[in-house]
Image (cartoon, rainbow, N blue to C red):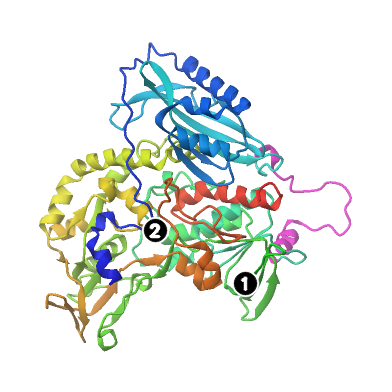
Amino acid sequence: MAAAVVDQVPSSERLVPGSVNIAIASWPASANISEEATDALTIASEIITSFNQSLERQDYAAIADLFIDDGYWKDQLSLTWDFRTAKGKGKIIEILQGGHHLVNVAIDQSPPNQGPQVVGLRYDGSVRGIQLFTTITTKFGSGQGVVRLVQESSRWKIWTFFTSMTKLKGYEEAVGSNRPRGVTHGEQTRRMNWLDRRQADSNFENSEPDVLIIGAGQAGLSVHARLKMLNVSTLTIDRADEVGDAWRNRYHQLVIHDPVWYDHLPYLKFPDFWPVFAPKDKLADFLKAYAHMLELNVWTKTDLESSTWDDEKKQWTVVLKRRRNDGSTETRTFHPKHIIQATGHSGKKNYPEFKGMANFKGDVLCHSSEFRGAKKDANGRKAVVIGSCNSSLDIAQDYYENGYDVTIIQRSSTMVITSDSVLKLILGSAYYEGGPPVEQSDLLSWSLPQEVSKAMHADVNTLQQVHDRETLEGLNKAGFKTDRGPMNCGLFFKYLQRGGGYYIDVGTSQLIIDGKVKVKHGQGIDEILSNSIRLDDGTELQADEIICATGYQNMITTTEMIFGADVASKVGNIWGFDEEGETRVMWRRSGHPGLWLHGGNLAMCRYFSRLVALQIQAQLEGLAP
């Protein structure tokens, strides 16, 4: 019954269970603004001064009056110890009256910022206003912000106001002028050199970690790096043999779809000679080197045997079983105050149980996560790939290039975008070769309330339909059905609201258009036969190999597998949006004390790892409840 209900919802509009399909923001009316005749600095200064004066008086109605009627205030940790977005004057007043720790906002004119400027606020430049960067001060630290002003009836007002705390006062990162000395000069008995200290630290010979991270992919390593720079004792564990195996063990031809200038990790960026698109094994090796260079305490070949939470002591008791290279095992018990689940933003593999699977006599029948690559020189062997998104189409291309007769089974529709459109339209205004530092691009990108971001992506999607018209028309003509994502807002919002349902085209689209890869659309699987698949319409497809590229369940399924049903019941479904347009659970308090969830692509891990680390340190130091 549940599956039938899901099928009634168009693929473009499907969401993570419980997620809100947030609205598309209305664009403010745009006056004819002349850059030469507009004194952006004076206008911005008057508004920021009025804001600070009203903040000091706790005159929250006066602050709200600085905004247009449907203006937005998006905050990350500078108002409360949470992520909030207030839309409209009434909601802004409500949040401020509920208690906050913001002290002051100032215009930031330091490089690479250029002070307040008249800019195009809409992709096509039809809506113009003033944009300025800010610095913020809170009771507990400092941070950054972005403000966008629009002219309303000859009066300048705030359209979007973003504040984010990025530093805790007195707990600065150990970088730059705060870097460690590396040596203590002078006499010192029983001196340990760096290697001695490193081995003792990584093995926790005389200490315990305050934070345990489960998962040594980009999520686990990025937040571990942030915590290390804040001097928070941290241990990362992973069941795999080596750091990077989460990528290394995926299908043979995998190359990541995001460009290098979008993917940098904290503190140690990819080198200038790095390829635009990294092959999976090259990325895996980089992650292993990253953990080594940043001196992160990572235990591979390690299982979490058990975990229990003591609500009185506010700490976990965890039992770890570590397999050593010589074949021996070691069992250790620790009492971390926080655990971060960094196992990827998806959960268990979604592997359907089709009728007749046990009767299949072919060579391969598996989930895409277990696919290692097509056999070489297959000479007409037949492969069927069930599913129609990134993994499915990448695998189909691998099969075709090795001589297979390949058919994709597409049940509904797929949001398709060419790699060129991703580079030029989605990322090109903020992330590009020779562009601004990723920290500034991140600030601009994440400063947007999600309703405003959705409006921008609706515009981008319209442009993408034109840019990719030949590909999209060719796919639909060949029987591969495409969609435009939720509310016609494209790739990014399919990812944020559903976590899948899209294909970034790196070649398979043309194979489908040319008839080299066949498609069966709109059919489910009736039965797996000994050497074929029978579809719901009675069609039989011969198959030597069958791959179920059917995605993954919600991350909560992994939470339950690791910690048990009681802990998972306090967390709830992850990903998608709440009513304010904030991502649910991920990077925020999970609902269970001492448990955090962190994940996403490399760019998300880079940005949100700082915010997760700050929240944890604030709790460790007694600054946050």
| SS label for mark 1 | strand
Residue name at image x 77 percent, y 57 percent: 193
Q: Which residue is mark 1?
A: 307
**What residue range appears in magenta?**
176-203
> Image quadrant for the N terminus?
bottom left
Q: Which residue is mark 2?
A: 18
Looking at the picture, tell me which residue is in the foreground, 283 or 301.
Answer: 301
| SS label for mark 2 | loop
Residue name at image x 45 percent, y 17 percent: 40
Of all residues, the one furthest to the top in this rendering is 37
Name the front one of labels 1 and 2. Answer: 2
Residue 573: x, y in percent?
A: 44, 61
Q: Is residue 250 above or below residue 258?
A: below
Q: Is residue 603 left or right of residue 21?
A: right
Task: Residue 450: name its quadrant.
Answer: top left
Residue 361: x, y in percent?
A: 25, 87
Q: Is residue 589 left or right of residue 580?
A: right
Q: Tell me, yes or no, whether the highlighted magenta stretch contains residue 534.
A: no
Neighbours of disc 1 within 10 Å: few (<14), some (14-19), many (20+): some
Label 1 sits on what residue type? Ser
1 or 2: tag closer to the N-terminus? 2
- Residue 375 visible? The answer is no
Task: Residue 509: name its quadrant.
Answer: bottom left
Residue name at image x 22 percent, y 80 percent: 544
Number of numbered callouts drawn:
2
Label 2 sits on what residue type? Gly
The circle drawn on residue 80 is none
Looking at the picture, tell me which residue is in the foreground, 101 or 234.
Answer: 101
Residue name at image x 29 percent, y 87 percent: 358
Q: Tell me, yes or no, whether the highlighted magenta stretch contains residue 177.
A: yes
